[in-house]
Image: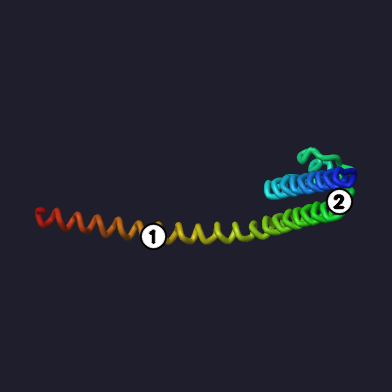
Amino acid sequence: MENDRAARLRGATEKRSRDTLARVNEVLQTMASAGESLTVAQVAAAAHVSRSWIYTQPALLERIAQIVHQDRGSHQRAAAQQRASTASLLRRLELTHQRIAHLTIENDRLREQLARSYGARRSNGD
């Protein structure tokens, strides 16, 4: 009977540990996809676990570190893209000015053509 209770207790402990780990992983996924800053304290608070428990989970700590590292890399890439986008925006502005100039010339030509067409209709008595 003693072994049966010990086995049930071990099973319950393992289940609670798996459930806690799943909850922390879900919180990690949510926080990472939301772009929130990630610290052990924030993860622990959001998952309702202790920081000390997280520190006893090497795989979890590694995953947090990977997410933080990826987040820093994406911020650096975003900053680089912004620097590149300034040159891109200047080029787009230049092309837009060229397009406006072209459309202005075309508009003037079409207005003149329309005016001639109306003039011709008036002269024919339409």
Residue designated by label 1 = 105
| Quarter where residue 108 is shown | bottom left
The CA span between labels 1 and 2 is 69 Å
In the image, 99 versus 10, the foreground residue is 10
Q: Nearer the viewer, residue 91 or 102?
A: 91
Determine the residue positioned at 69% across, 57% down: 83
Q: Foreground: 73 or 119?
A: 73
Where residue 60 appears, as percent x and y from the top left, is 82, 52
Please identify the residue farthest to the front as the structure is shown: 1
Q: Amino acid at mark 1?
A: Ile
Look at mark 2 in the image and give the residue it sits on: 57
Q: Quadrant of the N terminus?
A: top right
Residue at figure coordinates x 80%, y 55% from the top left: 63
Q: Is residue 75 left or right of residue 93?
A: right
Which residue appears at 77% of the width and 54% of the height?
67
Image spot of residue 29 (x, y percent): 71, 49
Q: Nearer the viewer, residue 116 or 1?
A: 1
Q: Nearer the viewer, mark 1 or mark 2?
A: 2
In what element is the residue under mark 2?
Answer: loop
**Is there CB contact under 8 Å for labels 1 and 2?**
no
Q: Which image quadrant for residue 104? A: bottom left
